[in-house]
Image (cartoon, rainbow, N blue to C red):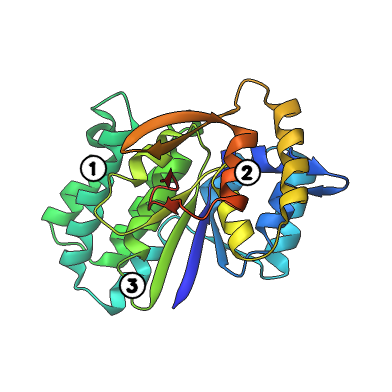
Amino acid sequence: MINIVYLDADFIIKTSKIKNNSSTLFDKIMELPYSFRITNIVFNEIKNSSLKKQLVDLIIKGKIKLIKSSECISALKDFLSDSAIQSLLLSTLKDICENIQEDQSFYQSNFYKLEALSIMQYDIDHFINEFELIVTNISKDNNIGEIVTLLNISLCNRLENVKVISLLSHDSSARRCVLSLHENINSFDCYSCYYLLKSNNILSFDEAKKYVSSWLREFPRNNIVKIIEEKSPKGVDLRKFIDIVYNSSNYTILRNGILKK
């Protein structure tokens, strides 16, 4: 089973700001034994030159795979007919747009041409080219990076021998949307990623506390994490959350990255 992880721009940016000496939380994430992917749209949303250089180095080393927005559409050609792929893409894309966009006309305004191509039964390669052209011309202010990432997450989960994980910002609309998808996708954010680091013996409790202190200095207003106890949600301080992750055995982690007692 291959663990494929899709990275979100906001997750990368925030975890790259959290440091323990010269190492960032993002550096630690990159030590996880997973296959990391980033779409070309998300990659282009990273504007910080030093961070972009780090991503380029990781791509060159093969630690992160830079993919086109249509990567998983192409991969499905080995499993589904052209018409089935087009139908799956359009229905998934519509669901994502409706969940992530306040403007409910966004899908129809931007992807109506794909609907027409599907009706006229154009071949899948032409369909893919038109999709790439459309998403490239949509402004990043319209959450297009999150949309294509969510699309790839959903479609990739249809491939054989693949388990998909999303790493998205804790306050991202994309993270909320990924949980509404029908696929069995595990989602982690800037808080619950500590669970992955602990489970893979990458970060000790003492090291985690140092990253948490850095987080609280960098993002002093973002220090409450939701957990579930006695079937009810509650908020706990980030320091308490880390203590639970590392020292409590009576919690399980849900598919959405939330700890439940």
For disc 1, the marked residue is: 94
In this view of the protein, which residue sits in the foreground, 82 or 230?
A: 230
Camera-nearest label, 1 or 2: 2
- The answer to whether marks 2 and 3 mark residues whose Cβ atoms lie closer than 8 Å is no
SS for callout 2: helix
Residue neighbourhood size for the residue with mark 3, other residues' Cα within 10 Å, grouped as few (<14), some (14–19), many (≥20): some
Give x and y (percent) for residue 136: 46, 44
Under mark 1, the amino acid is Lys
Give x and y (percent) for residue 113: 23, 44
In this view of the protein, which residue sits in the foreground, 144 or 33?
A: 33
Quadrant for residue 120, please give it.
Answer: bottom left
Q: Along the polypeptide, which appears first: circle 2 or circle 3?
A: 3
- The answer to whether marks 1 and 2 mark residues whose Cβ atoms lie closer than 8 Å is no
Quadrant location of the N terminus in the rendered image: bottom left
Label ID, residue 134: none
Residue neighbourhood size for the residue with mark 1, other residues' Cα within 10 Å, grouped as few (<14), some (14–19), many (≥20): some
Under mark 3, the amino acid is Leu
SS for callout 1: helix
For disc 3, the marked residue is: 159
User: Residue lying furthest top in this view?
Assistant: 221
Quadrant for residue 180, please give it.
Answer: top left
Height in image: 208 above or below 176?
below
Left or right side of 173 for 179: left
Alpha carbons under labels 1 and 2: distance apart: 40 Å
Label ID, residue 243: 2
- Which residue appears at 57% of the width and 45% of the height? 244
Residue 137 visible in the current orientation: no
Residue 102 visible in the current orientation: yes
